[in-house]
């Protein structure tokens, strides 16, 4: 327990100091990892915690990104101010589209979410409502500003993105250890038993989608701010698949695992650059091998620990 | 000490053959210069990054080049791919010379470090509309593939056609990467166009031609510059490709300049075949423009290079002719020509 | 000896569940295996059938060493099991389930005849012939599981708590049936929580405790044994 | 006062009438047994009461309130809890987490208080943890609290199901074959537990094929056959009912 | 009206290919509950192997076009089946007891691996089948043009479906496959060699995928190493639409998806056709949550 925390602390320290000795390229890779980590953590709520097969997460990411981009380019809202709007837009979108399909099970939900992702992408390409810019997307998004400081370079984005990851980890960790987090796990393990224990499974399914979507929406906003141009290609089916793989490979339901998974799936291919055109081949192979070796994911979740100490009827038994 | 110049090209993905050609051409030109002692005494080193023909891969490739100390970047092919990398190079203040990206928008953003050796789609649209008018069609169908280049060109052309009183009886987008376009062809056929203008890329164009033949539909097809690739004929087959018109800057074998002829001979000698399309050759032009700027400005500083190319460079020698850029970074001059595929599958320049 | 288990060890992951079981069954016998929850009764049956692999020891059935044999061959050799939790094929019909029971048996006439016999034994199943097994009530599924095992024309039948969830009248019926088929020559190994009924039926019995055999005796002696009475027969009885 | 009343409840699956026109009442504070041959419709009746199935016809009234067709979680919140015939625990979660599932419907915290943990949330968490531990103590699984549910023995899993149901603070508890797979000694302990439930004021409806247990635990029995009620009354009377003997108990 | 029927036949041709791929998908899914994302790449492999064999053997010159194509198909199916079996051994078998989605990720890894292997072996460019391997006749009925190849595609899919259906429903081995699909342990207790059953399924599924690849090569002529991704996704959609695990469902789903796409393109918009198809899919699943022919056993509680 303590040793684990020590390892986490060391890793966090390595990460925080990394901009000091990495060049812009590698810092940018880290930024990419950070954005995917946000996405994966948000998907983890839906897929890992609640066990709902969502392979269309890019849809929520897209809604958030476009919401931010449109507010910024059309209405001159500073991009970071649009963050709550992106969250709300993606969350509302989740309420709208998830409600009718939430009762679908397993692979049926999976293909429906794939479908939703594709519908969104196609709608963006075809310039729905004339505000998405069609295949060109939206360009000229302002760089974000914090306290008058304009963020441009990878080294600057690093702090914005990873700061947001840190906040997310903190909040999601608490959420996991709350009534809400537990309810999602019950739902995942056995929906009938959960309902029979008095949990409104329908509502929690939806709530998981909304929380996950809202967070993906904010990740989308940061993505738009970083790229300063967004277009439908950035929200393809493949993006959803990548995030899906991250969650499962890392250890569905465990945030440390998801984070590790992000480093592996987003960071590793960069390290394989030495293999030139064979690098994706190596990547595919590595994924198969990792899954076969760690069949539950690299860091599968364990049961929650509780502090029984000091509770009524506890004769000082430590746990 | 050597000067590093980046090349960003689709080495994988559906346009991989274009990327391979780009690399070979630029490397051959670089060797030529190095053999002659380099520029201002410095040798040139080419760093190649794969953009996969995909915008997301491209933005990573751009980051990577930008952090390896290149003084300028040549590339890339498709407009949407280029667009994803533009701001990154701009942030790092690295001049970029695109070779195939014709979308109008790219040079309308006022980016100081962006140039291109290819023409623009507004010119292409004009030539397309003019050609359709000259051939005497009154009703045409316009089909694109929902990429930013293809859609832009389609819209550009349709606006011009309307001005000329030519009716656009059908316009829609297909999904690239599919195999079966019969549904679209059937729908288009029933709209009764006298000609079809397809603004997408060659893999789809080949399939369209072939399937059109199979449904016994003999409508003339005109393609945009992205159909200019010999693979088109391979995919469609000679019979289906025969009679297909397309727009393009002059294809390699039609280049008038002696420099081009010599270079192509050397290329043929080294690699065994001529470059497939003009776009790879335009990457060579981009490289030559950069080296000319380094030589002329006697500097590798980004601002010096950009200034030189914008203002001082006049009629630099390129493979496809002389190179001059305007304030926006566009190449000066009219270059679009009409080609037709003959029975052997050769591209024949139309008068 | 018909079935002989010697020093059988079984591990689940790193945890050993059986620590050296010795047990034998003579041809034509009914042998009952008793034991508290988690004693290893089901594990023993599963390792006979080859679904869990022994980490040590031997299982010899009619001269064949089973512990290294794949499960499907063991069944073909004449070992059938009614598994714990029934495990009927939920999305197949009752009829198809029975059909599968006879997978290793290619004697069509015999298959038909046995199926009819099973329908006589459990008339409910006949009514539900083409209902999906998953929608049967718990007891109906249990009947189906027994019927399915009988379809294999086994030489030895392993039953894991066959009375679980059955109405008293059916428990009686099933135990009677077991006696009958035993008398017609089938050897039976019976794991039961309903220890009293099981011992009344059996010739001999074993008592398992945390992965070990702690008692082995004739059924009458076990029934009379005060330890057994205390632990498994609910003290005084009724 | 009757706590639960079923009036002419009917449930069909395709052409099969699993429960037909069944009516009975359960008095507050009593222990009632529901028995009958396999496939008689007992579990289905339970599922109708708990809202897992919706009846085709008929009415179910709990504590003066019509609960027919309400969703399960609403019914649980109103005070009806259950265990399942085939064990349905959250197998890969710990024993204490399983019990906390039951406590869920008595809690208030939502997403935001989960994230921001205001004092009220912390207090609530502590309270339910205490409640859950108390229920584990009650069924005798206190020392297993941090074990995984799947590592419990079968009998203990059944007890854990009861603890989870109790954590919903029910007034009415429905047990579906709780003694299945238990040996006689364990069954005896279960009987004690059921009696203690009544002392806590919880009304119990019990399906069980272990007649010894049913006879000793229940003060009233309802007998189903082919989905219909064929007898009702105190155990000693029902036991001698020829219809019940023929259909269910069998002659000795 | 003519146009409608023309579009209908267009859709059926596309749908026939979807169906053929979906059959393999559903077969594997039925037994392992595994969404074999590598299936699309086995399809691609079929197309490439077909091309290699076609150009190197020149079969049809010796034995006539149809016999040649049939022999070719058998060879392709055999080879792809072997690859499928190896895949099962290495990437899926070790994951049989683990959470379902782990195997899905392994399958995605396998997909990436296969796709890039093909790229490294053949290169990234488009390949083109020789034209006129099979007679490219087009027949015209009441103004509707139907290339013979389309009829061939449909017939092959239908025959495969019927054969598979009869095989799984009526034969001993077929029933064993279905039993293994439900509960492998219980199937073993019936004396079924579960490993063999799964191997068999992993021979049949990929073989079907491979044959579809060959068919696409022969009919459309142009192949490239990424094409399996889209086809795989479409086929998976088709399988779900029909009710995954259900063999006639795969057929119905495939044909229906093809027709929806064609009619959507014809009467609504070409650019939106995939979105339209997904909207229809979602609508159907809302009404029938287990697909058109999927089994609807209420879960017994
Ligand atoms: N699949 C498994 N994985 C890990 N441990 C297991 C598994 N199955 C059984 N065990 C453990 O092995 C031991 C013996 O279990 P087994 O099921 O054989 O007991 P049993 O005598 O049949 O009990 P019951 O009366 O509850 O059926 C127990 O400690 C159990 O927890
Ligand atoms: N979901 C369902 N679909 C179809 N038939 C069902 C379904 N659930 C139950 N049945 C049928 O309804 C009848 C009653 O089943 P139920 O489970 O209520 O019986 P039970 O009285 O609990 O029996 P047991 O004592 O064996 O558990 C059975 O014949 C069963 O086959
Ligand atoms: C290289 C060209 C064929 C590409 C096309 N002109 C574009 O801008 O995308
Ligand atoms: Mg057992
Ligand atoms: Mg029941």
Image: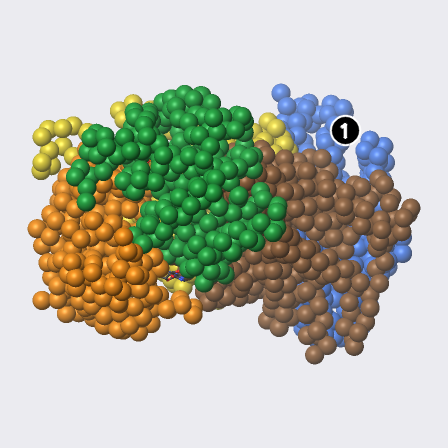
Chain colours: A yellow, B blue, C green, D orange, E brown
Q: Measuring 53% from the left and 37% from the top, which residue is drawn there? A: C78
Q: Chain of mark 1?
A: B
Residue D237 position, x and y percent, is 16, 61
B187 left or right of A183 in image: right
Q: Measuring 69% from the left and 35% from the top, which residue is drawn there? A: E120
Residue E26 position, x and y percent, is 58, 52
Q: Front-most of A302 and A239?
A: A302
In the orientation shown, which residue stands out farthest toward the bottom?
E1
E256 left or right of C124 in image: right
Q: Measuring 68% from the left and 41% from the top, which residue is drawn there? A: E81
Give the residue pinned by disc 1: B32
**Badge count:** 1
- Quarter of the image with the N terminus of chain A in it: top left
Residue A44 position, x and y percent, is 38, 44
Q: Measuring 20% from the left and 68% from the top, which residue is drawn there? A: D24
How would you rate the neighbour count of disc 1 (Cα within 10 Å): few for under 14, some for 14-19, many for 20 or more? few
Q: Is residue D23 visible?
A: yes
Quick one: SS at disc 1? helix
């Amino acid at each position: 327990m303590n040793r684990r925390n020590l390892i986490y602390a060391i890793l966090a320290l390595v990460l925080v100091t990394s901009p000091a000795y990495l060049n812009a390229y590698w810092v940018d890779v880290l930024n990419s990892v950070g954005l995917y980590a946000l996405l994966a953590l948000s998907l983890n709520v839906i897929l890992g915690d609640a066990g709902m097969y969502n392979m269309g997460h890019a849809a929520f990411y897209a809604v958030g990104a476009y919401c931010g981009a449109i507010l910024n380019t059309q209405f001159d809202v500073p991009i970071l101010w649009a963050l709550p709007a992106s969250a709300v837009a993606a969350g509302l979108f989740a309420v709208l589209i998830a409600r009718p399909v939430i009762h679908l099970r397993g692979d049926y939900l999976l293909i429906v979410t794939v479908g939703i992702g594709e519908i969104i992408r196609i709608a963006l390409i075809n310039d729905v409502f004339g505000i998405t810019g069609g295949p060109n997307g939206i360009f000229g998004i302002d760089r974000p500003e914090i306290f008058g400081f304009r963020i441009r370079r990878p080294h600057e984005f690093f702090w914005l993105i990873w700061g947001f990851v840190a906040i997310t980890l903190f909040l999601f960790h608490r959420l996991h250890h709350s009534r809400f987090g537990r309810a999602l796990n019950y739902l995942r393990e056995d929906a009938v038993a959960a309902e029979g224990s008095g949990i409104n499974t329908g509502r929690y399914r939806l709530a998981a989608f909304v929380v996950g979507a809202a967070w993906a929406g904010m990740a989308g906003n940061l993505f738009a701010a970083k790229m300063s141009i967004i277009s439908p290609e950035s929200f393809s089916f493949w993006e959803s698949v990548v995030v899906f793989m991250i969650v499962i490979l890392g250890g569905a339901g465990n945030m440390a695992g998801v984070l590790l998974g992000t480093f592996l799936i987003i960071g590793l291919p960069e390290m394989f650059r030495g293999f030139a055109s064979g690098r994706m081949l190596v990547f595919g192979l590595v994924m198969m091998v990792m899954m076969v070796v760690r069949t539950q994911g690299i860091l599968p979740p364990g049961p929650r620990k509780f502090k029984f100490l000091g509770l009524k009827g506890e004769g000082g038994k430590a746990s | 000490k050597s000067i590093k110049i980046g090349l960003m090209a689709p080495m994988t993905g559906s346009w991989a053959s274009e990327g391979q050609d780009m690399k070979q051409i630029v490397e051959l030109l670089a060797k030529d210069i190095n053999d002659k002692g380099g520029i201002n005494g410095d040798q040139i080193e080419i760093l190649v990054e794969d953009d996969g023909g995909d915008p997301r891969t491209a933005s990573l490739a751009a980051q990577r080049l930008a952090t390896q100390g290149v003084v300028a970047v040549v590339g890339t092919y498709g407009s949407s791919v280029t667009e994803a990398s533009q701001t990154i190079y701009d942030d790092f203040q690295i001049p970029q010379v695109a070779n195939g990206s014709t979308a109008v928008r790219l040079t309308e953003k006022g980016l100081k470090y962006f140039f291109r050796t290819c023409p623009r789609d507004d010119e292409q649209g004009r030539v397309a509309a003019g050609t359709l008018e000259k051939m005497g069609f009154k009703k045409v169908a316009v089909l694109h593939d929902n990429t930013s280049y293809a859609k832009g060109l389609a819209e550009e052309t349709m606006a011009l056609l309307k001005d000329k009183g030519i009716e656009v009886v059908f316009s829609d987008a297909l999904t690239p990467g599919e195999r079966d376009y019969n549904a679209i062809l059937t729908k288009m056929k029933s709209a009764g166009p006298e000609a079809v203008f397809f603004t997408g890329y060659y893999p789809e164009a080949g399939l369209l031609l072939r399937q059109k033949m199979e449904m016994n539909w003999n409508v003339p097809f005109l393609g945009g510059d992205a159909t200019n690739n010999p693979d088109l004929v391979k995919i469609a087959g000679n019979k289906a490709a025969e009679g297909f018109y397309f727009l393009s800057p002059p294809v390699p074998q039609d280049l008038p300049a002696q420099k081009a002829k010599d270079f192509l001979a050397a290329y043929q000698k080294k690699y065994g075949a001529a470059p497939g399309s003009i776009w790879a050759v335009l990457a060579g032009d981009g490289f030559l423009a950069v080296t000319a700027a380094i030589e002329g400005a006697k500097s590798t500083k980004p601002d010096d290079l950009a200034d030189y190319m914008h203002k001082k460079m006049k009629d630099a020698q390129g493979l496809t002719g002389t190179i001059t850029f305007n304030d926006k970074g566009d190449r000066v001059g009219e270059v679009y020509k009409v080609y037709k595929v003959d029975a052997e599958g050769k591209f024949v320049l139309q008068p | 000896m018909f079935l002989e288990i010697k020093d059988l060890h079984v591990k689940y992951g790193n945890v050993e569940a059986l620590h050296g079981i010795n047990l034998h069954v003579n041809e034509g016998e009914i042998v009952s295996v008793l034991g508290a929850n988690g004693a290893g009764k089901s594990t023993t049956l599963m390792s006979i059938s080859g679904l869990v692999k022994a980490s040590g020891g031997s299982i010899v059935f009619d001269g064949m060493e089973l512990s290294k044999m794949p499960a499907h061959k063991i069944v073909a050799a004449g070992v059938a099991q009614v598994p714990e939790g029934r495990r009927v094929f939920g999305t197949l019909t009752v009829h198809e389930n029975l059909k599968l029971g006879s997978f290793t048996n290619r004697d069509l006439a015999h298959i038909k005849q046995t199926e009819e016999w099973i329908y006589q034994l459990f008339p409910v199943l006949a009514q539900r012939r083409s209902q999906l097994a998953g929608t049967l009530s718990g007891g109906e599924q249990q009947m189906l599981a027994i019927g399915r095992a009988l379809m294999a024309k086994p030489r030895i039948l392993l039953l894991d708590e066959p009375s679980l969830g059955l109405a008293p009248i059916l428990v009686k019926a099933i135990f009677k049936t077991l006696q009958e088929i035993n008398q017609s020559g089938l050897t039976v190994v019976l794991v039961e929580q309903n220890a009293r009924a099981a011992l009344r039926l059996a010739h001999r019995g074993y008592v398992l405790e945390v992965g070990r055999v702690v008692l082995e005796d004739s059924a009458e002696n076990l029934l009379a044994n005060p330890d057994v009475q205390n632990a498994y027969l609910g003290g005084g009885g009724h | 006062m009757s706590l639960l009343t079923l009036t002419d409840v009917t449930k069909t699956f395709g052409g099969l009438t699993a429960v037909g026109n069944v009516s009975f009442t359960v008095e507050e504070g009593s222990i009632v047994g529901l028995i009958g041959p396999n496939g008689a419709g007992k579990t289905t009746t339970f599922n109708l009461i708990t809202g897992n199935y919706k009846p085709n016809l008929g009415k179910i009234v709990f504590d003066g309130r019509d609960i027919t067709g309400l969703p399960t979680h609403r019914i649980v919140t109103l005070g009806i809890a259950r265990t399942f015939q085939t064990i349905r625990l959250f197998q890969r979660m710990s024993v204490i987490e399983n019990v906390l599932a039951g406590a869920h419907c008595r809690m208030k915290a939502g997403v935001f208080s989960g994230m921001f943990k205001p004092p009220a949330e912390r207090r609530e968490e502590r309270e339910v943890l205490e409640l859950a531990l108390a229920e584990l103590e009650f069924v005798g699984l206190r020392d297993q609290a941090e074990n995984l549910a799947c590592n419990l023995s079968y009998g203990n899993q059944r007890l854990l199901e009861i603890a989870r149901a109790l954590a919903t603070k029910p007034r009415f508890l429905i047990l579906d074959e709780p003694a299945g797979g238990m040996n006689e000694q364990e069954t005896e302990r279960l009987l004690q537990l059921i009696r203690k439930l009544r002392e806590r004021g919880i009304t119990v409806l019990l399906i069980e094929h272990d007649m010894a247990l049913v006879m000793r635990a229940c003060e009233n029995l309802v007998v189903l056959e082919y989905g219909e009620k064929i007898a009702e009354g105190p155990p000693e009377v029902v036991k001698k009912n020829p219809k019940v003997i023929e259909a269910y108990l069998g002659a000795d | 009206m003519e146009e409608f029927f023309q579009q209908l036949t267009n859709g059926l041709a596309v749908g026939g290919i979807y169906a053929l791929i979906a059959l393999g998908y559903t077969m594997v899914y039925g037994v392992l509950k595994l969404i074999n994302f590598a299936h699309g790449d086995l399809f691609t492999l079929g197309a490439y192997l077909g091309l290699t064999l076609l150009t190197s053997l020149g079969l049809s010159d010796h034995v006539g076009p149809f016999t040649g194509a049939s022999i070719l198909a058998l060879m392709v199916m055999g080879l792809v089946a072997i690859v499928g079996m190896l895949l099962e051994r290495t990437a899926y078998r070790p994951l049989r007891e683990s959470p379902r989605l782990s195997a899905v990720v392994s399958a995605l890894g396998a997909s990436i691996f296969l796709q890039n292997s093909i790229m490294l072996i053949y290169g990234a460019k488009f390949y083109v089948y020789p034209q006129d391997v099979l007679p490219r006749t087009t027949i015209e009925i009441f103004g509707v043009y139907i290339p013979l190849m389309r009829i061939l595609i449909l017939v092959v899919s239908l025959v495969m479906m019927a054969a598979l259906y009869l095989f799984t429903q009526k034969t001993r081995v077929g029933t064993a496959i279905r039993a293994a699909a439900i509960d492998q342990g219980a199937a073993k207790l019936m004396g079924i060699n579960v490993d063999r059953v799964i191997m068999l399924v992993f021979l049949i599924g990929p073989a079907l995928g491979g044959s579809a690849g060959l068919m696409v090569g022969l009919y459309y002529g142009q192949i490239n190493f990424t094409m399996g991704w889209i086809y795989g996704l479409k086929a998976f959609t088709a399988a779900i639409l029909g009710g995954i695990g259900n063999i006639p469902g795969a057929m119905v789903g495939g044909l229906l998806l093809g027709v929806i796409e064609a009619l959507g393109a014809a009467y609504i918009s070409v650019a939106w056709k995939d979105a339209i198809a997904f909207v229809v899919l979602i609508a159907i699943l809302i009404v029938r949550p287990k697909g058109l022919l999927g089994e609807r056993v209420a879960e017994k509680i």
